[in-house]
């Protein structure tokens, strides 16, 4: 396990899990939102080149199933997928609380952006996006892992399962 993708729906805990996996295994951790998102929620210049550089190295953990422009590259270079396949009742409350806190505090996130209350009215808001694409994302991840026999897939159905694995 040297090149790891941590995949899940937004709010499942990919970043936290990714950091812990990287620390435990002595791997470099890369947060996809930091790599990808620039001011005004735009794609950062040089994003694709930076991901190409990262996945060209021998050891990394990335907390994303991959934006479309780098998804295939990431999956082709990964040797392990850690899938946080948690139920809606776990993921959606986590995501709601995170977005609520970000909207309330107005603290900057990726690229200096801030989540605003008015953003909740958009179907592109992370919470509403998760609500409407939850089943589709699960299906896409399942299909992607099934057709890649070179990948070791570790599928965790609850935070407790992930914790047990991390502790082992």
Image (cartoon, helix red, strand yellow):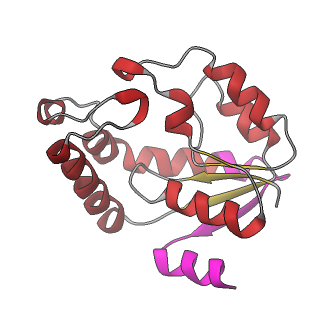
Q: Where is residue 146 in the image (x, y as percent from the top left)?
A: 71, 52
Please give the name of the residue rendered at 66% of the width and 45% of the height, measured from the top-left corner: 144
Name of the residue lying farthest toward the top: 45
Position of the N terminus, as image quadrant, is bottom right
Please give the name of the residue rendered at 44% of the width and 66% of the height, measured from the top-left corner: 86
Position of the C terminus, as image quadrant, is bottom right
Relative horizontal placement of residue 138, taking residue 80 as reference (left or right): left
Q: Nearer the viewer, residue 45 or 119?
A: 45
Q: Where is residue 59 in the image (x, y as percent from the top left)?
A: 82, 50
Relative horizontal placement of residue 151, taking residue 117 as reference (left or right): right
Q: Give the range drawn in magenta.
A: 144-168
Please give the name of the residue rendered at 71% of the width and 20% of the height, measured from the top-left corner: 49
Relative horizontal placement of residue 19, taking residue 160 as reference (left or right): right
Q: Where is residue 27 in the image (x, y as percent from the top left)?
A: 76, 56
Where is residue 151, by image quadrant? bottom right
Q: Nearer the viewer, residue 157 or 116?
A: 116
């Amino acid at each position: 396990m040297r090149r790891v993708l941590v995949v899940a729906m937004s709010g499942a805990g990919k970043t936290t899990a990714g950091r812990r996996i990287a620390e435990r295994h002595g791997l470099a951790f890369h947060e996809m939102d930091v790599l990808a998102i620039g001011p005004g929620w735009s794609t950062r210049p040089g994003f694709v080149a930076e991901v190409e550089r990262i996945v060209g190295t021998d050891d990394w953990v990335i907390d994303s199933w991959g934006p479309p422009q780098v998804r295939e590259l990431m999956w082709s270079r990964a040797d392990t997928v850690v899938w946080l396949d948690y139920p809606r009742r776990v993921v959606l409350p986590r995501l709601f609380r995170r977005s609520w806190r970000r909207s309330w505090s107005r603290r900057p996130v990726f690229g200096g952006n801030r989540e605003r209350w008015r953003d909740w009215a958009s179907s592109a808001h992370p919470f509403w996006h998760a609500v409407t694409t939850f089943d589709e994302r699960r299906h896409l991840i399942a299909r992607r892992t099934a057709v890649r026999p070179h990948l070791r897939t570790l599928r965790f159905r609850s935070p407790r399962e992930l914790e047990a694995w991390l502790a082992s």
